[in-house]
Image: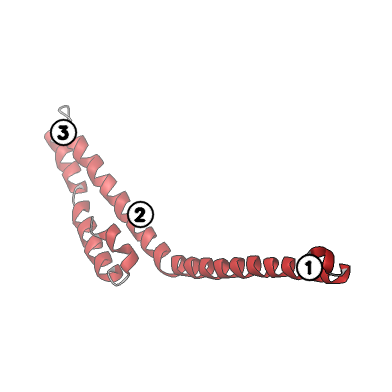
Amino acid sequence: MLKNMSFQWRLMSSFSFMGFLVLIVALTGWNGNSRLSNHINTLATNNLLSLDSLWKIKEGQTQIESAQRILFNSELTLKQRQDILALLTLRTTYSVQTRCLKRLYSPIPSLQFLLYE
C-alpha cells in the first residue's frame, strides 16, 4: 500500500501525523497547567490563612499540655503549682481561638475536617 503512494505524499502524511501527536500532548499539558493554576490560587487564598491559624492553635495546645505535665511533678511546692496554674489559663484562650476560627473558616469546605477533629 505504501509503495503505491508517492514519496511526497508519504512524507506529508507522516509529518501531519507527528504534528497531530504534538498537538494532543500540548493540549493535555495546557489543560493540566490551567487546573494546577486554579488549585494553587485556591491554596493561596483560602488554605494558607487557615493553616497559619491552626498552627497557632496547635502551639497553644502544646504549651498547655507541657504545663499540665509539670503540675504532676511531685517535687513542686504549692506556690510553684499555683504559678503553673496561672499558665493553664491559656486553655481558655485556646478554646476562644478555636471557636472564633470555626466560625471564620467553617464556610470553607476543604478545611472542615481539620477544625472539627
Q: Secondary structure at mark 3?
A: loop
Depth check: give the residue in front, 81 or 107. Answer: 107
Mark linked to residue 55: 2
Depth check: give the residue in front, 19 or 101. Answer: 19
Q: Give, as a three-letter code, the residue at label 3.
A: Phe
Quick one: label 3 or label 1, which is nearer the N terminus?
Answer: 1
Question: Of circles 3 and 1, which is in front?
Answer: 1
Q: Which residue is mark 1?
A: 15
Q: Quadrant of the C terminus?
A: bottom left
- In percent of width and height, residue 109 lies at 31, 68
Q: Mark 2 Cα within 10 Å, few/some/many (few <14, many 20+)?
A: few
Depth check: give the residue in front, 93 or 45. Answer: 45
- In percent of width and height, residue 32 lies at 55, 66
Q: Is residue 32 left or right of residue 102?
A: right
Q: Mark 3 Cα within 10 Å, few/some/many (few <14, many 20+)?
A: few
Q: Secondary structure at mark 2?
A: helix
Looking at the rendered structure, the number of numbered marks drawn on it comes to 3
Q: Secondary structure at mark 1?
A: helix
Residue 10 position (above or below residue 81): below
Q: Which residue is mark 3?
A: 72
Mark linked to residue 107: none
Q: Are marks 1 and 2 in contact (CB under 8 Å)?
A: no
The image quarter in which residue 65 lies: top left
Tell me how far mark 3 sits from mark 2, CA to CA.
Answer: 26 Å
* Residue lying at 17% horizontally and 27% vertically, measured from the top left: 75
Q: Mark 1 Cα within 10 Å, few/some/many (few <14, many 20+)?
A: few
- In percent of width and height, residue 91 lies at 20, 52
* Residue lying at 64% horizontally and 68% vertically, measured from the top left: 24
State how the image is colored. secondary structure
Q: Quadrant of the N terminus?
A: bottom right
Tell me how far mark 1 sits from mark 2, CA to CA.
Answer: 56 Å
